Amino acid sequence: MGSQGGFGQSKEFLDLVKSIGEARSRSEEDRIVLNEIETLKRRIIEPDIPKRKMKEFIIRLVYVEMLGHDASFGYIHAVKMTHDDNILLKRTGYLAVTLFLNDDHDLIILIVNTIQKDLKSDNYLVVCAALNAVCRLINEETIPAVLPQVVDLLNHPKEAVKKKAVMALHWFYQQSPSSVSYLVSNFRKKLSDNDPSVMGAALCPLFDLITIDANSYKDLVGSFIKLLKILALLGSGDKHASEQMYTVLGDLIRKSDSSSNIGNAVLYESVCCASAIHPNTKLLEAAADAISKFLKSDSHNLKYMGIDALGRLIKLSPGVAEQHQLAVIDCLELNVTT
C-alpha cells in the first residue's frame, strides 16, 4: 500500500498528484488518469477496505472528475460514506456527492434519509455538511422531506448553521417558489440578525424577491441603512475589507436621492461609513461634495447632519474644513438668530 505521506494520504496518492502535475501534454495527463481509473475500479470493490483507505479512494475519484473523466463507477461509495458516524468521513462523503451528483440523479433518493437524520444532529459540523448537500441536491420533489428541519435551523445557536439554513431556503425558492412562498418573511427577519454573515445570506434571496416586486419591500430600507453601519464596523482599520467597499459606497454617495428623507438617510450613513473605514481619496472627495448638499439645505435637520458628517470627515482630511467654513458660519449665525 505504501507508507503514509503528508495530510494522512498514502505515497501512492501523492505520486498520482505529482505525476499529473508534471504531465507535459494533455494526452500524457489523460493516460495517467485512465490508468488511475482502472486501478480504482479494481481496488474500490475489494473486501474489507479500511475506512481511511476508502476515504482516499473517494478523494482520488474527485481528482478523476476534476480532470474531466468519468468516475460514476464510484459514486455509490461516496453516497455510502455520507452514512458514516465519523465526522471527517461523513464530510468527505458529502463533499464528494455534491460534486458528483446533480439534483435529479438516481442516487439522490439514497441520500435524503441521511440528510434528514443529519439535520437533527447535535454536532453543528454534521448539520452544516448536510445543509451544504441540501443546497445542491434537494429538488422540487424532495423539498417537503427536509423543509421542516431547515426552517427549525433558522433559530440554531450557531451562526454558521443559521447562514446555511437561509441559503437552503433560498435554494428551495429558486427550485420551487410556491413551495416556500409562505416562508418569505424569514428572509426579512434574518436581515436583522445579530450576525453579519446571516444578514449577508438573507440579502441574496431578498434581491431575487425585490427584483420581482420592489413595492412589497420598501419598508426594508431602514434595515439596509443598518447594513451601512455594519460595513463601517467591518472596514474600520482593515484596508483589504475597505477596498471591497469603495466602489459601492462611491456609487451610493453619488447616486443617492437627496430629495427624500430616506435618500438623505442613506447618503448620510454612506458618508459616515466612508469616514470610518480605511481612507480613500476619491471616496472622501465624494463625501465632501455630499456634505455640501446638507450644509446648503434649507432644512435645519439636514444642516445638523452635514455638520456632524463634516466633523467625522475632518479627522481624516483636515483640508475639507476650509471649503465648508463659510457654510458652517452660516449655520452658527442661523442658530443665533433663531
Image: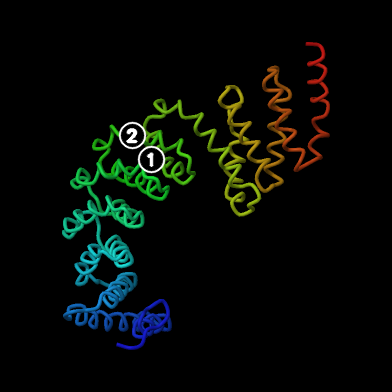
Type of the residue with mark 1: Pro
User: Circle 2 sits on which residue?
Assistant: 184
- Most distant residue in the bottom direction: 2
Which one is closest to the eye, mark 2 or mark 1?
2
Q: Earlier in the sequence, mark 2 or mark 1?
A: 2
Expressed as whole percent of the image width and height from the top left, the position of residue 108 reads 19, 57
Expressed as whole percent of the image width and height from the top left, the position of residue 16 reads 36, 82
User: Circle 1 sits on which residue?
Assistant: 205
> Is 103 left, or right, of 320 in this rendering?
left
Q: Nearer the viewer, residue 22 or 75?
A: 75
Expressed as whole percent of the image width and height from the top left, the position of residue 67 reads 34, 72
Expressed as whole percent of the image width and height from the top left, the position of residue 319 reads 81, 39
> Is 322 left, or right, of 191 in this rendering?
right
Residue 235 vertical placement versus 209 (above, below): below
Q: Across the whole image, how many numbered discs are drawn on residues?
A: 2
Residue 104 vertical placement versus 337 (above, below): below
**3D distance between C-alphas at marks 2 and 1:** 9 Å
Residue sitting at 27 percent across and 50 percent down?
A: 120
Type of the residue with mark 2: Val
Residue sitting at 58 percent across and 36 percent down?
A: 252
Q: Please tell me how crowded label 1 is: few (under 14), some (14-19), or many (20+) other residues with Cα within 10 Å.
A: many
Disc 2 to disc 1: CB gap under 8 Å: yes
